[in-house]
Amino acid sequence: MHDAVAHLAPLLGTWRGEGHGTYPTIESFDYVDEWEFSENGKPFLRFVERTWIGGEPRHTEVGYIRCPAPGVVEIVAAIPTGQAECGTGSVDVSDGLVVATDATVGNTESAKQVDRIVRRFEVDGDTLTYGMEMAAVGEPLTLHLKATLQRVS
């Protein structure tokens, strides 16, 4: 594992659990959430998120987490609904692992307008909690997703 991301090792693997989504413009929903974090010796982690509702595939995204300096993290993610997320944040390893990012979002011409995504990953042993706030379609930054996942591999 590359030294620049070695402190992110607790994220590696596949995580699966239950999540809840809400936003002012939609009906609340429950979903199955799966995150896979991997590394290949380069100075970044790759991630893939997949979700299901009632066994049917729903959201997915892919991206990278980089650590260009100690305590600093960058996120780059591609979302198939027409958004690209780029942002920075922090890494705290003082009590488990906490990765927090704050990103602006680029949108394709036909995509719903998303302006900002704020994420927080917390690893405590084999439990990963994830939260995502979003500013979109004229709404201010608001909690959108929250999930608790267990390491499955």
Image (cartoon, helix red, strand yellow):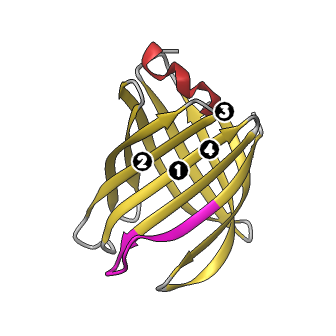
Relative to 13, say whether 34 is above or below: below
Which residue position holds label 2? 101
Q: Judge the density around disc 1: few (<14), some (14-19), many (≥20) Cα neighbours within 10 Å.
A: some
Q: Quadrant of residue 79?
A: bottom left
Amino acid type of the residue tagged 1 in the rendering: Arg
Expressed as whole percent of the image width and height from the top left, the position of residue 40 reads 50, 20
Q: Which residue is mark 1?
A: 120
State the residue at coordinates (52%, 69%). 143
Task: Identify the element where label 2 is drawn.
Answer: strand
- Asked if the magenta segment contains residue 14, the reply would be no
Q: Earlier in the sequence, mark 3 or mark 1?
A: 3
Residue 147 is situated, as x and y percent measured from the top left of the image, at: 66, 58
Q: Secondary structure at mark 3?
A: strand
Label 4 vs 2, first from the N-terminus: 2
Q: Quadrant of residue 50?
A: bottom right
Q: Position of residue 8 (x, y in %)?
A: 55, 28
Query: Sequence-wise, which precedes: disc 1 or disc 2?
Result: 2
What's drawn in magenta, residue-wise?
Answer: 135-146
Give the mark nearer the N terminus: 3 vs 2.
Answer: 3
Q: Which mark is residue 122?
A: 4
Q: Please tell me whether mark 1 sits on a helix, a strand or a loop.
A: strand
Disc 3 + disc 2, Cβ < 8 Å? no
Sequence-wise first label, 3 or 4: 3
What residue does disc 3 label? 13
Q: Are marks 1 and 4 in contact (CB under 8 Å)?
A: yes
Cβ–Cβ under 8 Å for marks 1 and 2: yes
Q: Is residue 24 above or below residue 99?
A: below
Check residue 138 for magenta coloring.
Answer: yes
Residue at the image point whose x is 48% and y is 35% from the top:
91
Does residue 3 appear to the left or right of 36 in the view shown? left
